[in-house]
Amino acid sequence: MGRVVGLDLRNESISGGINNSSSLFNLKSLQSLNLAYNNLSACQISSGFEKLTTLVSLDLSDAQLTGQFPIGISRLTRLVSLNFSWNYLEVGNSNLKLLVQNLTELTELRLDGVNISSKGEEWCQAISSSLPNLRVLSLSFCDLSGPLCSSLENLRSLSVINLSHNNLSAPVPNFFANFTNLTELFLWDSNLQGTFPENIFHVPTLRDLDISGNELLRVSFPEYFHNGSLQTLILSETNCSGILPNSIGNLQMLSTIDVRNCSLSGAIPSSMANLTQLVYLDLSYNMFIGPTPSFSKNLAHIYLSHNLLTGTFPFTHFEGLLNLVLLDLSHNSLIGSIPSSLLELPSLIQIDLSFNKFDGQVDEFSNASSSLLEFIDLSSNNLQGSIPMSFFELGRLTDLAINSNNFSGPIQLEKSFRPNLLLFLDLSDNQIEGKIPNWIWEVGNGSLSYLNLSHNHLVDLQEPYVLHPNLAILDLHSNLLSGKIPIQGESAQYIDFSSNNFSSSIPPTVGSLLTYAAFFSLSNNSIIGSIPPSVCNMRDLHVLDLSNNRLSGTVPSCLIQRSTSTLGVLNLRNNRLSGNVLTVFPNYCNLQTLDLSGNRLEGQIPKSLSNCRRLEVLNLGNNMVSDRFPCFLENISSLHVLVLRSNRFQGDINCQGENNQSWWNLQIMDLASNNFGGTLSSGFFSNWKAMMIDNDNAQPKFNNLGYLYFSEYTAGYYYSDRVNVIYKGIEVELVKVLTIFTSIDLSSNRFEGKIPDTVGNLKSLVLLNLSHNDLEDSIPTSLGNLKKLESLDLSLNKLTGMIPTQLASLTFLSVLNVSYNLLVGRIPTGSQFQTFSEASFLGNPGLCSFPLNTSCNDTRVAPNFEDGHSTSESEVYLSAALGFIVGLGIIIWPLVFCRRWRRWYYKHVDRVFLRRIIQRRVYRNSIRQL
């Protein structure tokens, strides 16, 4: 027993720790000890290891050790190899010096994951002064800081350097190129800065180089590569702009190239065809253009997505790619057809050709039953014809996305389809017609979790059908479906049947059938009847959208009580609901969006609504609410949208003791068509900070209001709010309310007095409508500060004086209406004012000059307002409409009117979250099986 010189107990499920009396420490001749991959967390590291003075190699990596590093290890002066990586240990800076000062024979030091927390000049000096023979230095995830001091240059024998995932905040030293034995250099994700030394690329012994994840590190490729040893080159997410030189083809030992997200441009070098050992290639998220060359037959992973590649399909000889496992060419501009021979490759598991311009028909392919394909994404192309039946003969298929193409015809599959574990099926945004076959609910033998058939021409569901209980996401919106609403599925989390032709009533037991629903939408149908109280039984409900139907009756009070738990969005707009606005809101209301507009609701706004401190959108427009202005909502600082238009509100809107922190985020205020009156207080507009920010410094332009929710199956989903903006007969629905869009509409009320100068502080304002009131005095010159203003309507008031010349500097102003006031003088000149028609200025007897076709010497009689409105207002509306469409369209045209762009946005953002659902469910099920 005492003569044992080597003991290898790694991964032997040892647990409970090793105490000082263990017989292990009686092995006085022991030279090599390996206890890695065990669970020794029950106690501190035994001091008994100090007795093993003959040890040459000690490996306790990944052994679940905790606490302070045993400094007694420094007594093992014969150690050549020491590995304590991936434990939960700490070594203070002074202890690091004590640990290594006597280990002068050490050639391999691995302390990855050990908390050293030391500055560069300290840890560098401790190691370089004590370990002159060191060949392997691995200190990744050690909380080290820089700089990389020159003392490290003394370690001339270094072969492996791994300092990854530290906060070095320093450049890479040039002397690394002087290490003549260097084979591995790993410095990824270490906050490196400066310029990477080009000479390191030429170190003749260097085999593996990974400096990825250092966004501030400038990397320039040498014009000539001549390193015959380099096998791994990983430079992703560095500042590596420029081109990939043709000389990279000289690195004929390369098996891995990863330059993802490096801002590289130009063509992919044709010399890469010489890299016959290449197995992994990632050139994605760059700006490569043109065709791609032929690649090694050994390639298993190809990532060329998110570039500017053009031309036909880049590979012409698929028989040379027999080892290809993964191919990603998505987000390019490739054209032509997709060869069926690609789908026949024997090793192919994943293929992503989405977001290109491939067209034509996808032909049937052979050997589908024996294929290894698991993931196919051909979405967002121009593919046509019928869906290949071969897809449904792939026995291992789990994800199939062929949405956003032009596939047509009915879904014609036999009941004996082969995929046994199909989890994700997306056929949306095509031209598929006919009935949804009842066997589709049995796809994958009940494994299907995601089914999206939206944006097609489907008309009905074939009966009988039973939705499988594992189906978590069912999206059938934007079809022609009618008849009975298919509400089943005990595990359903996301159900969207919006924008169809359903005209029946909601089943009274809907809440019991969809107990776990987080998202439920029946909007834009013709559904009748009342809202069944059982909807409150959906215990995980986050979003309920029943808008744009023919629902009648009252709003179930239990829905409001549900807002204490999960309910974040309640949208019942444009129905025939009646009764009081709502009942009492609970103390802990989580509502973020409440839209009850376009109904027949009466009564007053309950003061308890102020309990909804997260409220961002409140829309009660187009009802019969009789109340005063809801000053009690001023403490809801999260409010972005307040719409009370077309009701029976009355009184002034000036709140007592105006709160200096009220409504900081307000961006849309619509009080039009009520009986509000009194003067407009200057303080009323003084707190709206979101309208005061210059848009150039505001949030990104594609941010929009909405509700992000998480649940067990859906991982994350974003519901976008919608708000109507009305400008004199023009009603535009903002499908996604951009955070940069700001609007104030106080028209058709009884406001009097001056327009406050403080309105001019709202520098990001896009629409301002104060028309049809009794406002007096002159137009404030401060309105000239509204540089983002696109629409200004001050018509039908009693404004006097001249039109401020400052308005001529509003270069975005495309709609102006000051008609039917008491304005006088010359109309300002300027490039923008030259575009406004006569209708913008009618009814002001004292105005003159273009475009009124009167000189400023003419004397004109003011027409009677009562007589003038009926004949001229339509002209004003027409002019306003044309200008409004041109101006406002700059911001919202793509989101409101561009169907394909809007779908791309939805798919590109939302589908990332939904795809994760399947991965999480598979993982969870596998854990349960274990």
Image: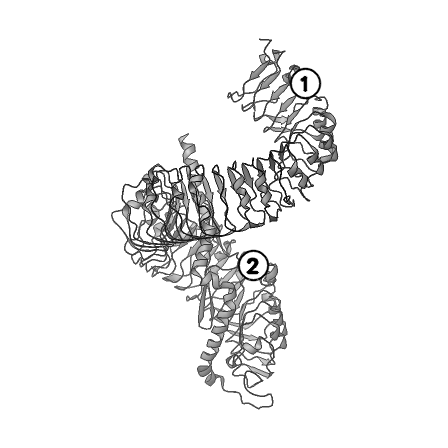
Residue tagged by mark 1? Answer: 76
Disc 1 residue crowd, few under 14, some 14–19, many 20+, Cα 10 Å: many
Q: Name, please, the residue furthest toward the left.
A: 464
Instruction: Give the vertical position of 569 relative to 111 (above or below).
Output: below
Estimate the spatial distance between the alpha carbons at disc 2 and disc 1, rounded to whole Å. 65 Å
The three-letter amino acid code for the residue at tag 2 is Asn
Q: Nearer the viewer, residue 153 or 770?
A: 153
Residue 379 drawn at (x, y percent): 42, 50
Query: Which of pointers 2 and 1 lies earlier in the amino acid sequence?
Result: 1
Q: Report the disc number at residue 267.
A: none
Instruction: Give the vertical position of 772 relative to 260 (above or below).
Output: below
The three-letter amino acid code for the residue at tag 1 is Leu
Quarter location, residue 250: top right
Determine the secondary structure under disc 1.
loop
Quarter location, residue 30: top right
Q: Is residue 232 visible?
A: yes
Q: At 56% across and 65% down in the image, what residue appears?
A: 655
User: What is the quadrant of the C terminus in the image?
Assistant: top left
Q: Is residue 780 visible?
A: no
- Horizontal side of 358 relative to 220 (left or right) equals left
Residue 427 drawn at (x, y percent): 37, 50
Q: Nearer the viewer, residue 687 or 104?
A: 104
Instruction: Give the vertical position of 329 relative to 645 (above or below).
Output: above
Residue tagged by mark 2? Answer: 665
User: What is the quadrant of the N terminus in the image?
Assistant: top right
Disc 2 residue crowd, few under 14, some 14–19, many 20+, Cα 10 Å: many
Which of pointers 2 and 1 indicates the residue nearer the eye?
1
